[in-house]
Each structure stands twice: as structure tokens, then as C-alpha cells.
Image (cartoon, grey):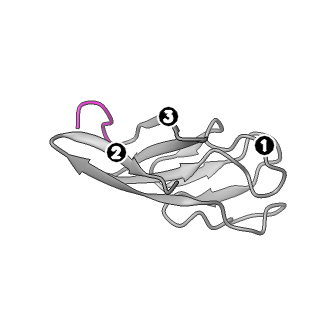
Amino acid sequence: MDELPPGSLKIVPAGYITVGVYNCDGEYFALEDRCSHDDGPLVEGEWEPDRCVVICPRHGSYFDIRTGRPLTLPAYEPVETYQVVVEDGQVMVDVPD
């Protein structure tokens, strides 16, 4: 996908929430832009494409983009992940209503 090449991120509105859509080595993952530690922004933080990890910009918790699971404190609850579908060359996120 030219729109989202490997190692890139796109932040998009999805209904009533915002999600980050990541391309980790050719696989697409979507994560809610909300840290489970304090409800602050998450996908606006830095991320490590080689490890598929996002770092919360407020308190530095690392999250696995593939599962939403926190890898470091202070976060200990996972964040929402969403299925990503590619149809006719377009990347779409399946966010339930």
C-alpha cells in the first residue's frame, strides 16, 4: 500500500474514537488512541516499527501494537485493538459501533 508503507503510522478518526493504524513489516494493526493508564493520547507517541511497540508520550509505558498489551509500567491494562482490512487497495479499520 502506497498510502501506508512498512514502518509508517496513520492517525484516523473512526466513529467516536481516534485510532492509529500501523504498518509493522507489512502487517497492519490498529490501536485506540487512549492510554489505559490515564486516558491520555497514546498513538501520538513515538513508536518502534522494528519491535511493533508504541510508547505513551505522557508516562512512557510501552504497548505491543499487535495485542494492545502493556509491556511496561505504569500501565497494566491493555488498550483496544481493532481488525484492519484491506479491500481494493484501501486500508480500513473495523471499529464496532
Q: Give the amino acid at mark 2.
A: Met
Q: Looking at the image, tell me whether mark 3 or mark 2 is earlier in sequence order.
A: 3
Which segment did they paint magenta?
Answer: 1-6
> Is the residue under label 2 in contact with that under label 3 (CB below 8 Å)?
no
Residue 45 % position (x, y): 66, 38
**Which residue is most to the front?**
97
Left or right placement of residue 31 versus residue 39 in this view: left
What residue sits right under mark 2 in the picture? 92
Q: Residue at x 18, y 40 (%)?
A: 89
Mark 3 Cα shell of 10 Å, populated few (<14), some (14-19), many (≥20): some
Q: Looking at the image, tell me whether mark 1 or mark 2 is earlier in sequence order.
A: 1
- Label number found at residue 40: 1
Say what secondary structure mark 1 lies in.
loop
What residue sits right under mark 3 in the picture? 12
Q: Looking at the image, tell me whether mark 3 or mark 1 is earlier in sequence order.
A: 3
Query: Is residue 8 positioned above or below 26 on the image?
Result: above
Q: Residue at x 67, y 66 (%)?
A: 78
